[in-house]
Image: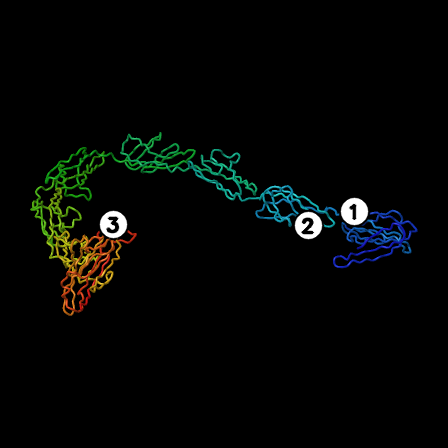
Amino acid sequence: MSATRGWLSSGEVTLTVEDDGGRDHLASSATARVAVTAASTEVAKFESLTPKPFVEGGRLQPVYSGPLAPRRRFAIAQGADTQVVWVDADSGEMQILHAGQTAIQVTQSTEQGEVLSLQSFQVTVEPVANTALSVADRELEYGFDAQFSLAVEGRIGTLEFALADDPSGAVIAPADKESGRFEFVGIGEARVRVTDLGDRDHKPTSVTTTVKVRRIASNSLVTRDLALTYALGLRTLLPVAGNQGALRYSLVDGAAQGVVVLAEDGNIELLKPGQTEILVEDDGGEFHQLQSGIIRVAVAKMTNPDLVADNLKAVFSEEAVLMPEVRGAKGGLSFRVREDEESAKVLSQGSDGSIRYKGAGRGWVTVSDAGDDYYLPAETGFYVDVSYAEGSLAVDDIDIQFTEGKQVALAISGQIGTLSFRPDNGQPEDVVSFDADTGMVTLLNAGSTYYSVTDSGDAGHAAKGVMVRVTVRKADANPRLSLDRTLIEEEFTLGAPLYAPTVSGKLDGSTLKYAAKAFGQQVVSIDAANGNMVIQNAGTALMTVTESSRNYEDRVLEYEVRVTPASYPGVPELELAKSVAFYPGMTIAPPAVLNPLGRVSYSLYGAYPADEYELGDDGRLTVHAFPSSTPILLHVTDDGGSNYLAGQNSSSRYFSGFAEDAGEQARMTFEGAPLTIPSPVAVPNGEVSFYKAFTTSGHAKTQGDEEMAGSYSLQKLTVCGDGGCVPVMLRLQLTGSCGDGGNLANALGSLQTPDCASEVTVSFDEGDQIVPSIPTGQFRSREPMMLVHYARPYLPGGMIEAGDLQARAWWLLDVDITLP
């Protein structure tokens, strides 16, 4: 550390200096002996300088009182700031370096070097404002997405920029506060405060500048003069483009009023022809300057396309005055006869403007329309065809019914000259004939024709011709026309011919036409010329024969054609039926008719056991049990269609035995000891079931009342061994325990409820006398027996199907016994 001490009096003192060593060293100390002797003379007393403003390079003088010692030395006091001033060691004059505060130590001593005084004084240099700082005001045109900066002069330190009186940034906004860049926001004035934060020698200084943002100069507005032709109610939009803001429209001061109606949106509606000028002002919108333009609107009068003068036709008359027929005129009309040779022969014009007829021919007249405030003058013309005065000839038309050779007088009036007759171009000349001398008309044929009758006229009248229509209507139909028969009946033979009835009483020159009365009938085809027919189908059809002639109405006669069905050709030919292997519930397709003539149906002969088989509507056989009588005979009927009577044939259905692996539960073997066969068929409450047993030779027979306990069934089988074949009887009985504690013992056909367990016990019949007589040896059945359990289709928890009981399970049972 260092310390500065002033001298208070003379004497000797010992100073101890201690250093605490800081963080990294141990403390230590040292002593110094200082001897101050009394001055022999007075010394100057120095004072601290009052604070001085910073002036770079400025000079300062020390302030003291009293005489200076012979020798003195000025220096920056130890530890004081050496960057504030520079001091001259001999004179003590100081030169300002920087703002700040420092201390100057003055040592006064004798000529011999003896220190008389050691003093110090303070020097303070204060920072000054940056008087050179300045920012010029700016006036700028608004720029989209543009930025600008301010020109700052006299900058010393870091600059700061801030809005002074537009904190919301309605005109400009800082884009970069550090660099002083701004962006445009709106139109107007804003004041910006620029602050120079200064440096060691200068304190912060602020200046304020004005930034004025003006609207963008614009000359983009484009207008175009309008040249329009007036039309009532015509509206159009003024042609303006390039505007930057809202448009306002108004008539230029002094411009013509009442030519157009001007709307705020720039649409104009034409009121009358004329010229006017419209001022268009663009307010520039938010950022552009006002701009304007003038549109000159010239509305011309309309041409008059509606001015029409009708061409006229007139019959010559010296007294007649021409009355023009003019439409679409807009102003006053005037007429004048065209100055050409032809018009001068036909028309003349008086001093009053009236036009009269001079002779026959074609004369032209010019029509002038003066127009009005809205239409230009217009001209048109028309011609007048003036014809000769017409004669008065009139001839009545003739309408009469045909009578061969009849004569009729023409009804003629207004005849002036000589009459002539001729048929009109292309008209038939064989309807009537004219006698020019007598005016008589002779009927030749029915028909219609036109004749031209011409009166030659005289000197004052033109020849006149009239057209006479002569209509000779047909006479009534021929009443003598008749047929020799009105019914033709024949048995159907495809393609066979039929001949039309004979027609009598036919008129000379008439024609006959034959046709079916009903369109689309399919019984016969007919030749329209001669009436000959060809049979197509059996049935009845009405035919017509029509007599047509030129002079008589058509006569139509009817006759009936009846084609009866033919006998069936032989019998329906059936496909060959094949024998099938039986299994319960099987279906057998019906025999097909090879070439059916109509609809085929099937039926069974007489009464049949419905519990064994049944016939469906489609002819399919459903076989529930092996038929007790085979084969099954079917009637096959072909109804012959519409052309044949029904035909019949028959078909037999044979069975080749029992089918194996067709759904049976098992194929079992009876060896003599009682055999119990349980059924897997589930029968729901309220339902019943029963059994059947049979071979291809016959069904089991019930012994006793099958609904009474103790009844049973017997099935006859044939067994064969080395000793030959013999019949045996198998006893079949429903057995099993019931829910009431009893036991079941009934014949197979007994209807059983699910209260008793369903099973069948097979054994030999105790009363069979054949079995004991069978010789010893092994005997096997020649064919198996089939046992079938019938019930409605059902699954536990499911639905019961409607209808009859069906075969639900079946078994094949062979007999294989060995007798000792």
Whichever of callouts 2 and 1 sits on the residue coming sooner in the sequence is 1
Amino acid type, mark 2: Thr
**Residue 302, can we see it?**
yes
Q: Residue 432 placed where, x, y %?
A: 14, 41
Q: Quadrant of residue 371?
A: top left
Q: Residue furthest right?
A: 40
Q: Which residue is mark 3?
A: 686
Q: Residue furthest front?
A: 741
Q: Which mark is residue 756?
A: none
Q: Which residue is mark 1?
A: 52
Q: Which residue is mark 2?
A: 158
Q: Are marks 2 and 1 in contact (CB under 8 Å)?
A: no
Left/right placement of residue 236 relative to residue 707 reads: right
Which label lies toward us, 3 or 1? 3
Dot 3 alpha-carbon crowd within 10 angstroms: few under 14, some 14 to 19, many 20 or more: few
Give SS at disc 3. loop
**Relative depth, front residue between 269 and 247:** 247
Which quadrant does the N terminus fall into?
bottom right
Q: Residue 477 placed where, x, y %?
A: 11, 41
Q: Quadrant of residue 615?
A: bottom left
Amino acid type, mark 3: Gly
Amino acid type, mark 1: Lys
Q: In percent of the image, x 79 and y 56: which residue is there?
A: 19
Whichever of callouts 3 and 1 sits on the residue coming sooner in the sequence is 1
Vertical side of 671 occupied by 32: above or below: above
How many numbered marks does the figure carry?
3
**Residue 620, can we see it?**
no
Dot 2 alpha-carbon crowd within 10 angstroms: few under 14, some 14 to 19, many 20 or more: few
Left/right placement of residue 318 relative to residue 506 reads: right
